[in-house]
Amino acid sequence: MINRRRVLSALALVLAISCALPPVLGQNGSGDSIKIPFETYKLPNGLTVILSVDRAVPTVAVNVWYHVGSKNEMPGRTGFAHLFEHVMFTGSGHIPYGIHDKLTEGVGGSNNGTTNTDRTNYFETVPANYLETALWLESDRMGFLLDTLDIAKLNAQRDIVKNERRQSYDNQPYGRVSEIFSAAMYPKGHPYSWPVIGSMADLSAASEEDVKAFFRLYYAPNNATLAVVGDFDPATTKKLIQKYFGDLPQGKAVERPSVPLGKLEASKRLVYEDRVQVPRLYIQWPTVGFKRDDSYALSVMSSILSGSRTARLTKALVYDAQLASQVFAFQNSAEDVGTFQTVVVPRPEHTLTKIETAVDEVIQKFIAEGPTAEELQKAKSGLELEFLRGLESNLGKANQLIAGSVFYGNPAQFRTDYQKTLAVTAADVKRVAAQYLGRPRIVLSVVPKGKKDQASKATESEAVSVAPATRRGGRS
């Protein structure tokens, strides 16, 4: 996920537990016992609205999601969704540049935006008496952004995005890994085959009209969902939403891309020489997106394989054999596709080949045995805690409600997610381990420049060629 300000505190931890009004849980852990009262309705122009009152603290979160991400772009025209994440903060028809920050941060609130493959969101948390201001800010950039967007402003933000790419991808140690995996995992032209931030060439080639056409299609009310969560009066808020959003014109119908799951006919071995001091080993398998039920068991499996010192990979590689200093395993689920990845940082004097062998031994044993009852309970408890902490803040609740609405047409989807996570069995985990980790995979070794021989099974690995990094500021 790309973040406009690059360092965004975890949404789940905005409010301390002692200060928040947490969800009410029953003894049986049922999702029905999680109480987040809400109502939802739709304006005639297609804007979906979700309202959830929580008077625990005198603040309110205003959160707008547009169902557009990098997968909605086209080859040769990538990076547009993330570019707009920046452009949306440069002023609109009735709001000069800089006023958005003054009317949110200047009154003790906050604002930000993020982009990923599937959606873009913009949000504010403000004192409750500034709710109308936040609604006005969001409606003005939804309806009147193009009134002030000219080539000079576009070029300025294009340069900022390019420098962000230099900092986060091109000149960041191991920064090209996600881009390498996307290109290797999916065929050329696949909606998930390019990075969210886009390419330098595409950002340079984008015309003013290209960018404006993208906005007109995807940033209209019928492709947006607005959530208001916190201390507010619903009747008054409905009138304000009608006042500021009701007259915005509906856009054209959005055609969603047809996205096949990732599939590898055969395993790939890659090596990338980077400006790094320590090599790393990455192994990635294609899995499923978060709409598929297997994603729940895959997430539980990731918690069993890495994290605590007793997790399978962590214990075997970091503590028992002391081959590695760090091990990570995680399920990365997007709307349509998913991957399971392990990352290992070796200790000195231990080769990536030896590391890969050790990883395979742990995984093959896990496929054969499955998790113990203790491992399963510990993993699910950790995921449960993470989920509940994500509901402590108004903004966290807003994100859960909107995600359910955007991706499932149901703001209460969080209850189903909660129930299905807790319902995962040892047999489920054992099955997905065999089904997905037993398939062809991509093994990527990132090694220091000129030291390709440090790759795992170096003679079998294909060198990865990527566009050279650009170091200077300004436009390319």
Image (cartoon, grey):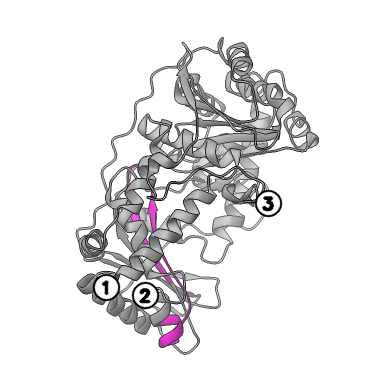
> Residues in magenta?
317-343
Could you tell me which residue is drawn at 55 percent across and 66 percent down?
Answer: 173
Q: Name the residue under label 2.
A: 312
In the rendered view, tell whether residue 235 sits above or below residue 399. Answer: above
Q: Does the magenta stretch include residue 43?
A: no
Amino acid, disc 1: Phe
**Crowding near the residue tagged with mark 1, few <14, some 14–19, many ≥20 C-alpha atoms within 10 Å:** many
Q: Is residue 340 magenta?
A: yes
Residue 87, given in percent of the width and then of the height, sits at 62, 33
Label 3 residue SS: loop
Count all numbered tags in the image, as a single digit.
3
Q: Which-is-in-front pick, marks 2 and 3?
A: 2
Left/right of residue 400 with respect to residue 286 in the rendered view: right
Could you tell me which residue is drawn at 71 percent across and 33 percent down?
Answer: 58
Q: Mark 3 points at which residue?
A: 473
Label 2 residue SS: helix
Residue 433: numbered disc: none
Amino acid, disc 3: Gly
Residue situated in front as seen by the camera: 182 or 10: 10
Amino acid, disc 2: Arg
Q: Distance between the residues labelled 3 and 1?
A: 48 Å
Which of the marked residues, 3 or 1, is nearer the chain's N terminus? 1
Residue 375, given in percent of the width and then of the height, sits at 35, 69
Which of the marked residues, 2 or 1, is nearer the chain's N terminus? 2
Whether label 2 touches label 1, CB < 8 Å: yes
Residue situated in front as seen by the camera: 393 or 319: 393
Q: How far apart are marks 2 and 1 (CA)?
A: 8 Å
